[in-house]
Image: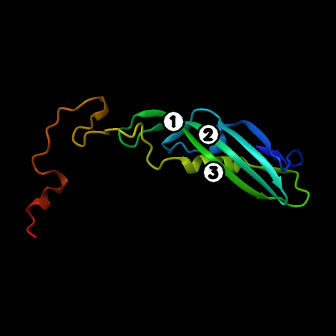
């Protein structure tokens, strides 16, 4: 997204549009893939010698849940996009595309979840506990912390 500086005043000028999802440069090994374009709605203001750009940016993504492995769709959004560009003498345009990309990437969760209430997988049989309880019995050995039960302190 290129902003032509000569079109922008101190009163501001609104820009709304889309960028191709390829600007996100997500790798195939990532748990999230784009489902559509990156959308933005920003207002630009020239307050010499600066260009201030603020607004919102969002991207629809498809992800793999880090608990259950199921796939889900989500909208990653930065409602408080704000950047300050120092204008050089004679500068005609400012490219905000890298900053739109950064705004979306900074909103990505480290461990994407299909839902906050995701129950995950059974540690014994691997069944998806979101689909219902499994047939496994609770471990009789006290689980992974069972050895600590015998400690005398």
Q: Which residue is mark 1?
A: 74
Left or right of 70? Residue 19 is right
Front residue of 3/53: it is 53
Instruction: Write down the residue under mark 2.
Output: 58
Image quadrant of residue 113? top left
Q: Which residue is mark 3?
A: 102
- Which residue in the rendered view is the most extreme toward the top? 131
Residue drawn at 64 percent across, 42 percent down: 57
Residue 25 visible from this viewpoint: no
- Which mark sits nearer the N-terminus, 2 or 1? 2
User: Could you say where residue 46 lies in the image, as x and y percent from the top left?
Assistant: 83, 53
Q: Picture quarter containing residue 91? A: bottom right
Q: CA distance from mark 2 to mark 1?
A: 10 Å
Q: CA distance from mark 3 to mark 2?
A: 11 Å
Left or right side of 84 for 115: left
Residue 142 in percent (x, y) is at: 12, 51
Circle 2: element type: strand
Q: Quadrant of the N terminus?
A: top right
**Mark nearer the N terminus (3 vs 2):** 2
Q: Are marks 1 and 3 in contact (CB under 8 Å)?
A: no
Q: Is residue 7 among what the camera can see?
A: yes
Mark 3 falls on what kind of element? helix
> Quick one: label 3, few (<14), some, or many (20+) residues within 10 Å?
few
């Amino acid at each position: 997204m290129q902003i032509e500086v000569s079109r922008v005043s101190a009163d501001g000028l609104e820009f709304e549009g889309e960028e191709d999802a390829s600007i996100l440069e997500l790798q195939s090994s990532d748990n999230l893939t784009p489902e559509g374009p990156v959308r933005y709605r920003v207002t630009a203001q020239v307050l010499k010698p600066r260009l201030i750009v603020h607004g919102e940016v969002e991207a629809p993504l498809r992800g793999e849940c880090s608990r259950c492995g199921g796939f889900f769709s989500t909208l990653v959004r930065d409602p408080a996009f704000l950047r300050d560009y120092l204008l050089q003498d004679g500068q005609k345009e400012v490219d905000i595309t890298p900053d739109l990309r950064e705004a979306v990437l900074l909103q990505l969760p480290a461990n994407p979840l299909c839902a906050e209430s995701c129950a995950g997988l059974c540690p014994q049989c691997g069944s998806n506990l979101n689909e219902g309880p499994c047939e496994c019995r609770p471990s009789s050995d006290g689980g992974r912390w069972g050895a600590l039960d015998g400690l005398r302190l």
